[in-house]
Amino acid sequence: MNNKQESILRYIQNKKLLEKIEKSLSKEIFNELIESIELQKEYVEAKVSTNAIISYKDEILLVRLNRPESKKWKLSLPGGKVNKEQTFNQSLRQEVYEETGITSESYSIEKIWIIHNEPMETCKHIFLLKLKEKISSFNFDPEELQEAVRFKIKDLPANPEEYRAPRLSKFLKEYF
């Protein structure tokens, strides 16, 4: 197996399928397929996430992480990776519910920011969610999160080191 084939194998992650494809196609067509997949890989490996700034009046909800160990107690926005079979809205609803217990009936989507600063960095879709009423308790997996915390916008922590991603501090200051 040559380097290109090994690269494609990592891409499709199924050696038997690759062998079947190779046997069923002429060498020329198989090589064209390999070239085509190599070109497409540059465009399909983007990581995408949805995150939520959940607000009610002059408050914003942040979560404190419980893992990984290096990020324990750091502040973050509720959110996570978009799975291949999900739309952005489905991912948003799922992540907000999993990390806070808040259902989509409880908020409206007011604004969306898309942040993608570096190649191979996760492309973040940050949704501003306005709660229809104040929520008094939150449900989340304690293995993932320590707590959900409401902050008055004027009292958001200023130290970037308190955040999972230090640039989140800058982002929140800039837009709020």
Image: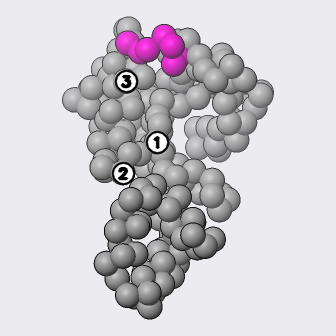
Q: As drawn, which residue projects farthest toward the bottom?
A: 28
Q: Which mark is residue 81?
A: 1
Residue at 67 percent across and 59 percent down: it is 118
Tell me if I can see residue 151 in this picture: no
Q: Secondary structure at mark 3?
A: helix
Residue receiving disc 2 = 84
Q: Which residues are magenta?
A: 139-145
Please name the amino acid that badge 2 sits on. Lys
Q: Nearer the viewer, residue 3 or 148?
A: 3
Q: Nearer the viewer, residue 131 or 5?
A: 5
Quadrant position of residue 24: bottom left
Residue receiving disc 3 = 98
Q: Position of residue 80 (x, y in %)?
A: 47, 37
Please name the amino acid that badge 3 sits on. Glu
Left or right: residue 64 compared with residue 132: right
- Mark 3: few, some, or many residues within 10 Å (few <14, many ≥20)? some
